[in-house]
Image (spheres, helix red, strand yellow):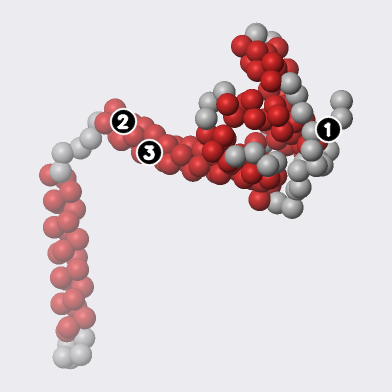
Amino acid sequence: MNDRQQPGIVLWIAVVALLALIIEAMWRIPRMSDYQQLGIGVWIGVGVGGVVWLALMVLMIASMWKVFVKAGKPGWAAIVPLHNLIVMLEIVGKPPWYIALAFVPFANIYLSIGLQFWMAKSFGKGMGFGFGLLFLAPVFYPLLAFGDAQYTGAPAV
């Protein structure tokens, strides 16, 4: 052997010996059961899901705030429960007593669905946009809030 090849061989022997030590040390680490691994996975999922949920809530609050401001209402009203529903009814031109429908079974479904279509119409959008507000609110409310939509007033009944 010449001197140039010898350091390469020594390096390979050192790498193999290091890998053998690492593998041997890994066998000594106590193993987690499947239930422990599942528990860790669940907590990771809860953490990621919680962050995603929080981001969606911040997006929806900011969007509703901006929609209220576009309609000439105070933005803070978007974060006050029940009051935001009353303000939304004002935006779409419905009487305040419609709030009672929120507490009547099946009528609350009518109110929830109708409110999305009335909101779209109040901003000059069509029925397709209303379906978007109904089924994909985290996408369409930001479009309504931060897009070029202008409040046209309550639609005529």
Residue linked to disc 3: 47
Residue at x 80% of width, y 42% of height: 152
Quadrant housing the C terminus? top right
Q: Are marks 1 and 2 in contact (CB under 8 Å)?
A: no
CA–CA distance between discs 1 and 2? 52 Å
Q: Secondary structure at mark 3?
A: helix
Q: Where's residue 140, x and y in %?
A: 68, 41
Instruction: Look at the numbered disc 1 and give the secondary structure of its residue.
Output: loop
User: Relative to 1, does residue 26 appear above or below in the rendering?
Assistant: above
Label 2 sits on residue: 39
Report crowding for label 3: few under 14, some 14 to 19, many 20 or more residues within 10 A (C-alpha): few
Which circle, 1 or 3, is nearer the viewer?
1
Spot occupied by residue 153 in the image (x, y as percentages of width and height): 79, 38
Quarter of the image where the N terminus is located: bottom left
Amino acid found under the numbered disc labelled 2: Gly
Q: Is residue 154 visible?
A: yes
The image shows residue 88 at horizontal and vertical percentages of 67, 30
50 to the left or right of 152: left
N-term-proximal mark, 1 vs 2: 2
Left or right of 6? Residue 149 is right
* Sooner in the amino-acid sequence: mark 2 or mark 3: 2
- Describe residue 133's horizontal placement relative to residue 121 as left or right: left
Residue that numbered label 1 is attached to: 155
Return the residue nearer the eye: 3 or 71.
71
Distance in Å between CA atoms under marks 1 and 3: 43 Å
Mark 1: few/some/many CA within 10 Å (<14, 14-19, 20+): some
The amino acid type, in three-letter code, at marker 3 is: Gly
> Is residue 125 left or right of 66 when viewed as pictured?
right
